Image (cartoon, grey):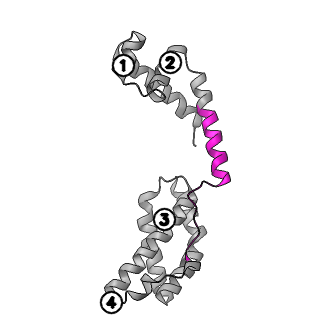
Amino acid sequence: MTEARFSAVFNEHRRGLLRFLRRRVGNEEDAAEIAQEAYLRLLRYADQQDPQALKALLYRIAINLVGMRQREAGSRHQSEHLPIEDLPLMSDEASQEQKLVDQQNLQLLMSAIRELPERCRQVFVLSRFHEMSYPQIAAHCGVSVKMVEKHISRALAACREKLGER
């Protein structure tokens, strides 16, 4: 995920996060400081593609930071009893939009695989779908392990090219 897109995700949830944190810590200054720390810690996950996963992670990091501050201050009772209505709702199931994007990506990958030369496609399928090792594939196809590596590299490059920015 690009830095601009990552920043956009953070900015989109900034107000809600600050409101959420103000209810926990009781003042604007501490809430802003915790939000900033949460953002810095969230940067470790910038490569995450799913904005909803980033939102959930941002809130989880913020909750953990509030808990750490409260433990340091000696007032643990508030962090142990968070009202359920204040927690962001999350589901383990992917959103409809994510399912559509995943389906489109799969179609692009399958198209890339179908467009590979016969031997390259065979080697790639044996490796990725039948989980054969390179030496097993080499023996099966009557080629060297080095040739198997070249076919795999070519196939992966074709898949990356087909998917582009996705």
- The amino acid type found where label 4 is placed reads Gly
Say which mark, if any, is on residue 74: 4
Residue 136: numbered disc:
1
- Residue type beneath disc 3: Leu
Task: Give the mark toward the camera: 2 or 1.
Answer: 1
Distance from disc 2 to disc 1, alpha carbons, whole Å, reads: 13 Å
Q: In the image, what residue type sits under mark 1?
A: Gln
**As displayed, is residue 143 above or below residue 166?**
above
| Relative to 19, 38 lies left or right | left
Which residue is located at x 59 percent, y 27 percent?
Answer: 112
Please state which of the two labelled residues, at mark 4 or mark 1, is closer to the viewer.
1
The residue positioned 60% from the left and 30% from the top of the image is 110
Asked if the stretch drawn in magenta spans residue 121, the answer is: no
Image location (x, y in percent) of residue 14 = 56, 73
**Residue 47: % across, % down:** 47, 52
Dot 3 or dot 1: first in sequence order is 3
Do the residues under discs 4 and 3 have CB atoms within 8 angstroms? no
Q: What residue type is labelled 2?
A: Gln
Tell me if label 4 and label 1 are in contact, CB under 8 Å.
Answer: no
The Cα–Cα distance between marks 4 and 3, rounded to whole angstroms, is 25 Å
Q: Of the residues under marks 4 and 2, which one precedes in the sequence? A: 4
Classify mark 4: helix, strand or loop.
loop
Which is nearer the N-term, disc 2 or disc 1?
Answer: 2
Image quadrant assignment for residue 69: bottom left
**Classed neighbour count for the residue bearing mark 3: other residues with Cα under 10 Å, few (<14), some (14–19), many (≥20):** some
Question: Where does the magenta region start and end?
Answer: 87-109
Badge 3 is on which residue?
57
Circles 4 and 2, Cβ within 8 Å, touching? The answer is no
Indicate which disc residue 122 carries: 2
